[in-house]
Amino acid sequence: MPLFSAEEFIQAKNTSEVLNFVDINTGVTLTEELLLQLNNGKPVVLCLHSSNQHAMPEVRRAFMTLMQQNVQLPCILRCLAADHTNDEHLIHYATETGALLLDGFGDGLWLVKTETAADTVDHTLLNNVAFGILQATRTRISKTEYISCPSCGRTLFDLQETTARIRAVTNHLKGVKIAIMGCIVNGPGEMADADFGYVGSGVGKITLYRGKEVVKRGLNSDVAVDELINLIRENGMWVETNN
């Protein structure tokens, strides 16, 4: 499918009847002339980005303009980064796009490394970061979701070790949300939107939940992970791994 700049799209005599992508620098090329072109019924996906140092507020303002002009087209958030480390890139991409996705703005991500960052970002990283942002903002669920408490003095088992054990056997369950909570005091409230809950209910004892409902109480911790798998299987949400 063709990718046009805003200027190219305005002047284009031949466009695809199936789909056209239009790359828009929101503070520069989102003009009245372009807005008129976008409302002419052509199948278009907008790719919004900003050259402003603080891009997110400017892209948000562009969404407001599109709403005011009744432009109802899918929008991809094109985020440019020129940072120097993987952690800096992760923070940049997440803050610039995550805030918009959480507010319901945007239908997809296009993460871009600038020339100055060419040696510090690879496509695998970009892919993983993109799927992570989409998962965290509930825009696209593509992997298992884990909800865990931060641990405190009431925690009744080794939270990190147990989370790692559960993740090792369930991380292939696309879209399943599993809560791992250290105690029965705050656990049920903090995991309210989870599909399944693994909650410490006493020293060496685990209570399993399906949603907000207790289904198995007082399990010994050495069998609780297997019982969690059985519970997921009983509810039709278990799939076998390829290996």
Image (tube, rainbow, N blue to C red):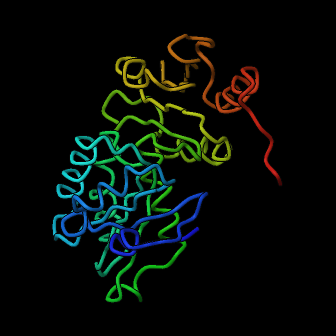
* Residue 37 picture quarter: bottom left
| Count of numbered badges drawn on the protein | 0
Instruction: Tell me residue 46's x, y (percent).
Output: 40, 58
Q: Is 129 located above or below residue 121 in the figure?
A: above
Which residue is at the front of the view, 42 or 60? 42
Q: Is 174 located above or below residue 93 in the figure?
A: above
Instruction: Tell me residue 172's x, y (percent).
Output: 68, 46
**In this picture, residue 23 sits left or right of residue 166:** left
**In this picture, residue 211 sits left or right of residue 238:** left
Instruction: Tell me residue 47's x, y (percent).
Output: 39, 62
Which residue is at the front of the view, 235 or 165? 235
Quadrant of the drawing holding the N terminus = bottom right
Q: Residue at x 71, y 29 (%)?
A: 237
Q: Residue at x 39, y 30 (%)?
A: 155
Residue placed furthest toward the right: 243
Q: Is 56 located above or below residue 81 in the figure?
A: above
Which residue is at the front of the view, 186 or 205? 186
Which residue is at the front of the view, 216 or 20? 20
* Residue 121 picture quarter: bottom left
Quadrant of the drawing holding the C terminus = bottom right
**In this picture, residue 23 sits left or right of residue 92:** right
* Residue 221 picture quarter: top right
Q: Residue at x 50, y 39 (%)?
A: 146
Residue placed furthest toward the front: 13
Instruction: Tell me residue 79's x, y (percent).
Output: 34, 66
